[in-house]
Amino acid sequence: MKVAILGNGAIGNLLVLKCYQIKQDVGVFMRSQQHFTLTATDIGHQAHQINIDSLARASLSEFNLLIIPVKAYQVVNALKQLQIDLTPVQTIVLLHNGMGVIDSAKALLPDNPIIAATTSHAAYKPDAQSVTETGLGVCHLGYLQHPGAIDSEQIHNILNRLLGPCTWHEKIEQALWDKLAINAAINPLTAIHRVNNGQLTELKYRADIESICAETVSVMTASGFHADKSELVEKVLSVANATATNYSSMYQDIAHHRLSEIAFINGYICQEAQKQGLDVPFNTELVNKINALA
């Protein structure tokens, strides 16, 4: 079983580290072929030097499992570029924050087993050739199409070793919404106020968190998903506290003048609210504020 990882973002590099630790055969695919040594520091503060030779796209068909841990806005373009080099027997894992690309992914690769995944494992990428594992977490996964069609037992085992503990869902959309709902509060607020996750537990941010959660819950329930405002507020505060020293991915994107995933997080909430005839002024304001900072 051979694993391919697309890109060398923070989570992509973390997956390379995990493969290195369990001696999993892995190939890295980047925009251009490169050779570099990745300095990867694990959760125990041990540094590993991992030599990486990124591969040509033409060799992608040799891999059984392709994990795509890129930004939400990069997913569709990445799949369009890779489409010609993929075969229907390869399983694809979409691993990104936010929602809104599933239908496009299914349309581009109608014959491939596709898994959607969301993880709370955390990593920080200070530069292109290093990564630091900053937090252990869990992973929720589910098939979007062709469930368990090809090598499913081996694939489940590998994903559990790389991202475990893993929970598999017959309907992954609920888990994706649950993760998005937490990100919708933490990510934009940390980016706008330039604070780390833990600072959001301060009382002065509570009203904003409750407003975001109230709107998100209204959209989720109208769309047929379970949600409760009190539970969501507590989850947001719990995650903020558990990752207190971390800076959210949106904070880092804004700080480094990169495109953020706001359109696929709070923007997705606004999009779904419009479908349900709901007003979400607080989420709309967050989208506008983040776009103004970009």
Image (tube, grey):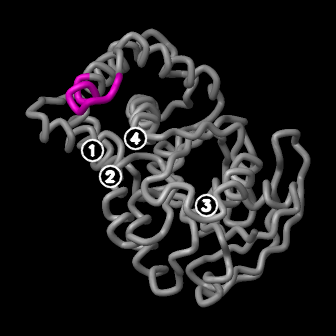
Q: Is residue 44 above or below residue 89?
A: above
Q: Residue at x 68, y 82 (%)?
A: 62
Q: Give amino acid for label 1.
A: Gly
Q: Give amino acid for label 4.
A: Glu
Classify mark 3: residues with Cα within 10 Å, few (<14), some (14-19) or many (20+).
many
Q: Residue at x 41, y 46 (%)?
A: 98
Q: Is residue 93 visible?
A: yes
Depth check, mark 2 against mark 4: the one in front is 4
Classify mark 1: residues with Cα within 10 Å, few (<14), some (14-19) or many (20+).
many
SS for callout 4: helix
Q: Given contact means CB atoms under 8 Å apart, are the residues at marks 3 and 2 in contact?
A: no
- Residue denoted by label 4: 173
Q: Does label 2 or label 1 sit earlier along the sequence?
A: 2
Q: Is residue 108 above or below residue 167?
A: below
Q: CA distance from mark 2 to mark 1?
A: 10 Å
What range of the chain is rendered magenta?
218-226
Q: CA distance from mark 2 to mark 4?
A: 11 Å
SS for callout 1: helix
Number of the label disc, if any, that sits on residue 59: none
User: Is 221 in the magenta?
Assistant: yes
SS for callout 3: loop
- Residue denoted by label 1: 267
Depth check, mark 3 against mark 4: the one in front is 4
User: In terms of depth relative to the viewer, which is nearer, 68 or 110?
Assistant: 110
Give percent across and percent down for residue 277.
8, 33
Q: CA distance from mark 3 to mark 4?
A: 24 Å
Depth check, mark 3 against mark 2: the one in front is 2
Q: Quadrant of residue 280?
A: top left
Number of the label disc, if any, that sits on residue 9: 3
Q: Given contact means CB atoms under 8 Å apart, are the residues at marks 2 and 1 in contact?
A: yes
Q: Give amino acid for label 3.
A: Gly
- Residue denoted by label 2: 100
